[in-house]
Amino acid sequence: MAKIGESISRIGADKRVSGKLKFAADLKFDGCLHMKLVTSNLGHAKIISIDKTEALQVEGVVAVISSEDLPKPMPMYGPFYRDRPLIANGFVRYYGEAVAAIVAETEVAAEIAASLVRVTYEELPGVYDLETALSASAPVVKSPFQRSQIPESNNVFDQWNFGWGDVESATVDAIFEGTYSFPMTTHFAIEPHVFVAWPENDGVVILSTIQHPFLLRRVVSDVLEIPLSKVRIIASELGGGFGGKGYPKFEPLLAFISLKYGRTIRLKLTLEETFYVGRRNSSQITVKAGFKKAGRLVFVDIVADFLIGAYVDAAARVVAKSAMAGCGIYNPPNARITAKAILSNTVPGTAFRGFGAPQFMWAIDSVMEKAARELRIDPLEIRLMNMPDKGEVFLQGEKPCDGDWKSGLKRAAELIGWGKPKQKNVGKGLGIGMKTPAPATVSVATVRLHSDSSLSVLIGTTEMGQGSRTVMAQLASETLQIPIERINVTNGDTAIVPFDSITASSRSTVFMGNAVTQACESIKKQLLETVSEKFGFSLNQISYEEGYIRTPDKDLSLSEVVFAKFGYVSGEFVGVGTYKEARNLHHPLGGGVSFYEVIFAGAEVEVDRETGVVDVKKLVTVGDIGKAINPLLVETQDEGGAIQGLGHSLMEHLVLDDHGRLMNAGALDYRIPTTMDIPHSLISDLIENQDGSGPSGAKGTGESGIMPIGSAIGLAISDAIGIEMHSLPITPESIWQAINNHG
């Protein structure tokens, strides 16, 4: 049996590493049409004309679709706000926005035709950075009906205010303040985005590289104005998601075209094209914190500005949700957090691993470090004295602290040799990551026990490399004591599997894990009741042990119980489990916190003062995960997140020119960590106190590894050079300039 807490190999890992796994881009569709997008070469412009003449003359071209070929008024879509047209309609609002779509019999014909479409633009003033976006004279990104009415700016989509106590009247001995910026970054999943649509049963089927198939189903149903039952979404196994494949991209457009021509249509983006479908929201966060001399935090006052792009996508949700927990795990008696989602003529911001938390963590940890330095308190100690104990309320109105967090921070410090003498130009830094899962969501699981005692587990959770199928199989195996080799997990097809809100927010182990366990317990109950009924035993005479029903007479196999219930023609037992949290209309996010995803990081770096080059000697993470269902999967998720965080800490950022054009799209110009950048020592440690809300006390993980890395590495660099750094990524150039400007 596969036990909870056992590091069994991930299901399907052999196919992934051998190249045998068929990703969406590998699938072939006979007789399908192919799409290629024509995109804008300006950040903001009016479309004067689209000349399709030459493109339509290419052999094999079926159509060149622009806004004039789509319904009027233009259908709009979006996961939370319907503000995005199927294709650019009269204006382009960011560089890379699709203005036309070639539909052809072959990919080659589509590519040739796309190069022959002539688009004439009238360039308009654009908003490409926060300073411009917030100025009183800023060009307007969107008309007023598409944004909230915030008086101080034309481009604030919405604003959220959180807090407790009274910041203004708090009495303190010292105030420390700083402004910290976080870059736009791209998700850079190696697998490209792929979308396929075809008509079926008076509706449409969409195969997509999508993390949230049921959310996509809702969006497509709304856009097409057809019942949910007529929209089938197949989520292929993903080669990385990180939030970039979470929300609808071009699926609604493909659905329209597929139904119009009655044929299968396929769109595969290049890696460079994926840079234009979503990115991490950049931010500028100012933190003002008041302290007593002994180091006790009295108030925190945060103003956070997020540049979210031309369309809202999931960005407003990112800003609101991360802002609610903007103080991290610190527990000041007074707090005020003001966060704004600000529109710009840039690629739409969306979910990205950490969902806004890395931006806040970098800012809050930096101010805590500054306070420690000025108050002459050890940075570890000032953090410890301002962290909650287990059971203590720290985020007012929410669930109390659900972990022994101080021990986690101490462990991270211990692993990097905190307090021990350092060599010249070597620095150490600590970071704390915390986020909350998506509130008020639902997961449903169906488990089928077959006549041969094998098991089918049906879940809506998407497999994107995190090992969800393995975890769910382990939970089912332990609950029903059935060997994991006899369990099959099916996911990703809305016509087959039951509802799951999203595969994100590190929620799957808790929410879907509980649902799977409930479904298995339902089957166990049915088996016991069947034996009681068919064999004449009372329920207190029988028990379920080691995959058998033990009776006073003999042990009955599960197959024997199935046959006793259904006869030798056979049937199956079906269990359904539902795990959900109630929606609270009075809560600013619609629901409360189910668990806290908390992790600690420590970094040791060496800086070459002549070149600014950073050598990460040691990087450690310590995750408060309640219980690791599969420790190896948890550890490798944390390690992957840490390396991804190393990217936005040291090198990754999207660069725009004065016309809003993205200058470093693609693998050659956008720098991500390689094997040459891996720390000399990379350690992922786990704290397991079984204090979570998931099966066996598990908490969510997966996003956590990335959250504290900017703080740990950034503060280690500051420690090494003796200069506070305010902007990520901290590149060799920025370090060299800081050292030389500092004198």
Image (tube, rainbow, N blue to C red):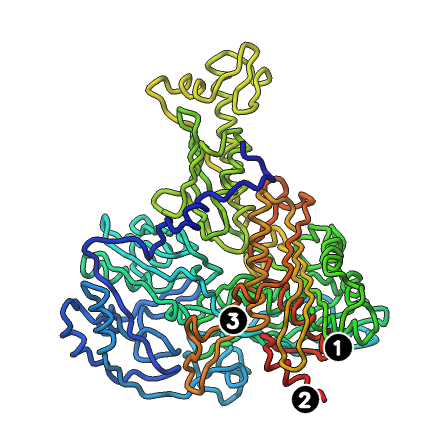
Query: Is residue 238 at all visible to an observer of this figure?
Result: yes
Quadrant of the rendered image containing residue 559: top left
Instruction: Count neighbours of disc 3 (C-alpha within 10 A) and say few if under 14, some if 14 to 19, many if 20 or more.
Output: many
Q: CA distance from mark 2 to mark 1?
A: 23 Å
Number of labelled discs? 3
Instruction: Determine whether, in the image, residue 629 is placed left or right of residue 279.
Output: right
Instruction: Determine whether, in the image, residue 612 is placed left or right of residue 29.
Output: right
Task: Name, please, the residue furthest toward the top.
Answer: 553
State the residue at coordinates (83%, 69%). Answer: 377
Mark in front: 2 vs 1 = 2
- In the image, 322 versus 236, the foreground residue is 236
Q: What is the number of the mark on residue 281?
A: 3
State the residue at coordinates (51%, 86%). Answer: 132
Residue linked to disc 2: 741
Which label's residue is closer to the chain start, 3 or 1?
1
Instruction: Determine whether, in the image, residue 683 is placed left or right of residue 18.
Output: right
Residue 341 in the image: state x and y as whole percent: 52, 73
Instruction: Count neighbours of disc 2 (C-alpha within 10 A) and say few if under 14, some if 14 to 19, many if 20 or more.
Output: few
Residue linked to disc 1: 176
Q: CA distance from mark 3 to mark 1?
A: 26 Å
Query: Circle 2 sits in a helix, a strand or a loop, which is it?
Result: helix
Q: CA distance from mark 2 to mark 3?
A: 29 Å
Query: Is residue 584 at all visible to an observer of this figure?
Result: no
Identify which amino acid the numbered label 3 is placed on.
Asn
Residue 461 in the image: state x and y as whole percent: 45, 48
Which label's residue is closer to the chain start, 2 or 1?
1
Q: Considering only vertical position in the picture, is 259 above or below 345?
A: above
Q: What is the number of the mark on residue 622?
A: none
Disc 2 + disc 1, Cβ < 8 Å: no
